[in-house]
Image (tube, grey):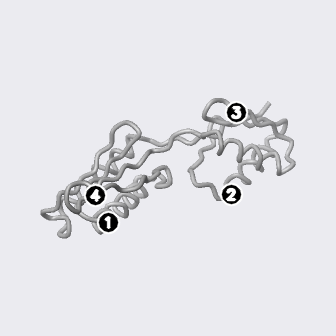
């Protein structure tokens, strides 16, 4: 029986490459000269340190641009509220979202079932498995999910006939 999996994974090596390129650009840019701005990743968390709000917003744009160049969707980041550090300096954490959480999984299952396609959807931890008798039904399900506006990037892997 044909099937495929729906996952939401981020290539952390490409993410690290984007951060390294961003740090290199920040060290060469005139508006960041003499500024104490840095970015670092630990596990599934990114910490942005900036001198002021303007530099923090510039760092957001730089990060999104470098992630796009490395073909990593910037929607994997969930920025938390910036907090004050010494003086006007700001510190902001951003979580890297991996996997499909329960709420998104329920939404995706409801959407797929709402299409009236003859497919079955099973939740397997942080991914979904979609099975059907016909390959065309699976392709229609993928097409429908790609048309949806979801805040998280989805990958369709493990397609089997």
* Residue 12 placement, left or right of 110: left
Residue drawn where x is 40% and y is 49% of the image: 94
Element at label 4: strand
Distance from the alpha carbon under mark 3 to that under mark 4: 40 Å
Residue located beneath label 4 in the image: 90
Element at label 2: loop
Residue 24 in percent (x, y) is at 22, 55
Element at label 3: strand
> Which label's residue is closer to the chain start, 2 or 1?
1
Distance from the alpha carbon under mark 1 to that under mark 3: 39 Å
* Residue 114 placement, left or right of 126: right
> Which label's residue is closer to the chain start, 1 or 3?
1
Query: Within 10 Å of the Cα at label 2, are there few (<14), some (14-19), or many (20+) other Cα atoms?
Result: few
Residue 67 in percent (x, y) is at 40, 54
* Residue 79 placement, left or right of 31: right
> Which label's residue is closer to the chain start, 3 or 4?
4
Cβ–Cβ under 8 Å for marks 1 and 3: no
Given this view, does label 2 or label 1 mark the residue nearer the observer? 1
Element at label 1: helix
Residue located beneath label 2 in the image: 148
Residue drawn where x is 68% and y is 36% of the image: 128
**Residue 153 — which label?**
none
> Which label's residue is closer to the chain start, 4 or 2?
4
Given this view, does label 3 or label 4 mark the residue nearer the observer? 4
The extreme left residue here reads 34
Task: Depth check: give the residue in front, 34 or 155.
Answer: 34
Residue located beneath label 3 in the image: 123
Residue located beneath label 1 in the image: 58
> Which label's residue is closer to the chain start, 2 or 3?
3
Residue drawn where x is 71% and y is 48% of the image: 142
> Which label's residue is closer to the chain start, 1 or 4?
1
């Amino acid at each position: 029986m044909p099937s495929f999996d729906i996952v939401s994974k981020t290539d952390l090596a490409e993410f690290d490459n984007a951060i390294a390129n961003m740090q290199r650009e920040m060290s060469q840019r005139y508006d960041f000269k003499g500024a104490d701005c840095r970015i670092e990743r630990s596990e599934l968390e990114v910490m942005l340190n900036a001198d002021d709000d303007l530099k923090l917003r510039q760092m957001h744009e730089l990060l999104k641009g470098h992630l796009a160049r490395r073909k990593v969707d910037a929607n994997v980041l969930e920025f938390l509220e910036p907090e004050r550090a010494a003086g006007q300096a700001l510190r902001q954490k951003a979580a890297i979202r991996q996997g499909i959480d329960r709420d998104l999984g329920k939404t995706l299952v409801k959407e797929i079932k709402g299409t009236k396609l003859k497919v079955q959807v099973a939740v397997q931890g942080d991914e979904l498995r979609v099975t059907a008798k016909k390959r065309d039904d699976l392709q229609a399900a993928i097409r429908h999910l790609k048309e949806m506006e979801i805040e998280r990037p989805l990958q369709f892997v493990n397609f089997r006939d």
